[in-house]
Amino acid sequence: MESFNNIRVLELGRVFSGPLCGMVLADIGAEVIKVEKLEIGDESRQFGTHTAGGQSCYFNSLNRNKKSITLDLKDPKHKAILKNLVVKSDVLVHNWLQESLDKLGFSYEEVKKMNPSLIYCAISGYGYNSAFRNQPSQDIIAQSVSGLMSLTGEPDGLPMKTGIPVVDYATGLYAAFAIMSALYMREKTGEGQLVHTSLLETALAITSFESSLFLSTDINPVRKGNRHPSICPYNVYRTRDGLVTVAIANQDMWIRFCGALGLEVLKNKDEFKTNKLRLKNQDILEPILEATIIGFTTEEIMEALKAARVSCTRVNSIKEAFDSAEVKELDMVLNLGPEGAVSVVGQPFHLEKVAEKEAAPPPTLGQHNEEILEEL
């Protein structure tokens, strides 16, 4: 894409939220220079046990379309290089502990003196102005502190983190959105500004209706497994040979669902007539549905429910997902680098009037040192 091709971003990003933010901006055309520690780099380069193209699959998933420069910010010469880059950039985004950058002379106040038009985005664990701002945090910590983890898992089991670091992911997206908003404002005022967000703020935001329930009624939400707290039926069910997910989005779909499974008697029962009644009597309804659905194979029930325009699907593994017709239709797999050695999932959005550029593979550590230093 070329919509941001005149925007330069300095990404002091580590592991997930910062690098994801940088990658989103790179995907829409920004020049993203990833500033990494000398010799070590972003520690996620060493995460996990699997590599592709000589780098960890974890790192590859978050760092396409970027340039990498390695600096030791305790070295005055290297610090001068970063200052030069700050002067010539539009955005600086980081997810370091803020006190670490402050001590090195790259606080927002200092950077603003170098470049008043710069957008400075700080991603923290607990909040830029929080008394806890200098405490380290990770996705699982934010899920724990926020109560998000208490909502995930079976009712009689342990709280569970989400299968992917959803707080990290959403924080990176919020940060990118805020940066874009600040850049739009700069177009009108010419002024830069401080943008900040945190894992904890994001985690609280995505507890969504469950937090609204508590704040409005003082009712403390609890884990419900795959059941939905506000919609019924909405669950994963065993079939004769696997699993199927069913999500009844409205009353008309409930009626079609009952007809497709030969359960017309349920739609007229007083205890199941409305969504509120079905939620209230869920412990009665669910065993009936489980006993019915397990009599079908997955293909049989999928055919019946899809013919009735009921939201349903089999439960795929990652392999099965990428083998599925639905995912293949989207053409989201990018094969990057020599002989396509690095495979990643591409961007999940498209702009009609902006051509999508050919994606570049994640940079090797310090790959663009010479290019960037020569320009400076």
Image (cartoon, grey):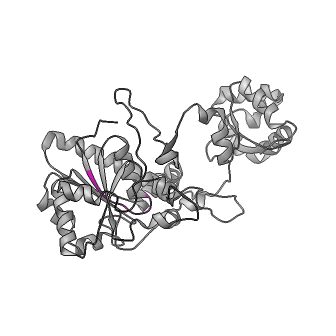
| Front in this rendered view, residue 60 or 157 | 60
Against 330, is 167 above or below? Answer: below
Asked whether 77 falls inside the magenta stretch, the response is no
Q: Residue at x 39, y 49 (%)?
A: 23
* Direction from residue 157 to residue 48 in the image, left or right: left
Asked whether residue 215 appears in the rendered view, the answer is: no
- Residue 332 coordinates in the image, percent (x, y): 52, 38
- Residue 159 coordinates in the image, percent (x, y): 63, 64
Q: Residue at x 64, y 57 (%)?
A: 223
Q: Which residues are magenta?
A: 9-16
Q: Residue at x 41, y 57 (%)?
A: 17
Q: Name the quarter where the N terminus is drawn.
A: top left
- Residue 346 coordinates in the image, percent (x, y): 48, 42
Answer with the quarter of the image where residue 306 lies.
Answer: top right
> Quick one: which residue is furthest to the top in this view?
307
Q: Residue at x 38, y 27 (%)?
A: 352
